[in-house]
Each structure stands twice: as structure tokens, then as C-alpha cells.
Image (cartoon, helix red, strand yellow):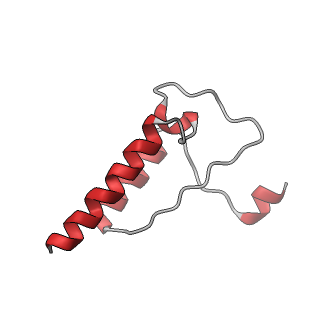
Amino acid sequence: MIEKLRKNLREISLEAGSFRNGSYPDFVKSSSPAPFKNHIPVFMFHSIKPKIFEEQLKFLAENGYRTITCDEFMK
């Protein structure tokens, strides 16, 4: 349990550093990002806990994100 907690803290620290150093795109860190032009953001979830995942999907939907099909992408 302690080792898992240490691993999670290391991962959080690395992500926080990436965020501070500007490694994240504008739509992640800005409260009012510019609209996408010819770009499609792709979200990748490394682990899924049903309640948290539901909240994340709800947040994305409430903020204008939607899923698209492969056919829509290819147009």
C-alpha cells in the first residue's frame, strides 16, 4: 500500500511539473481556450473508476466536447 502511494505521488509530481512547464495544451490549462481549428483533442484515460469516469465525461460534455465516429473524422 505504501509503495503504491509513493508511485502515485511520483506520477502526480511529474504531471504537475509538466503542467507548470507548459507541456499541456492550452485547452487543458486555460479557463477560456481558443477554439480548435482543424484539430481534434484526444483524451486517454489510464485507469477508470466508474464514478470518477462518469464525472469526467459529464465535465467534458458540459464544456462542449463530444465524441465523433471514424467516418466523421475522415470527412
Q: As displayed, is residue 41 above or below residue 10? A: above
Q: Position of residue 33 (x, y in %)?
A: 56, 28
Image quarter in which the N terminus is found: bottom left
Residue lying at 49% horizontally and 29% vertically, measured from the top left: 30
- Judge whether 43 appears above or below 1 on screen: above
Position of 20 with respect to 7 (left or right) is: right
Q: Residue at x 43, y 54 (%)?
A: 57
> Which of 38 and 6 lies nearest the eye of the viewer?
6
Seen in the picture, residue 27 relative to 11 is either above or below; the reply is above
Residue 71, picture quadrant: bottom right
Q: Position of residue 7 (x, y in %)?
A: 28, 66
The residue at 72%/43% (across/down) is 39
Quarter of the image where one finds residue 74: bottom right
In this rendering, position of residue 52 left or right of residue 18: left
Residue displayed at 37% across by 68% down: 48
Query: Residue furthest toward the right?
Result: 75
70 vs 4, left or right, is right
Q: Nearer the viewer, residue 38 or 64?
A: 38
Q: Nearer the viewer, residue 27 or 52?
A: 27
Q: Position of residue 68 (x, y in %)?
A: 66, 57
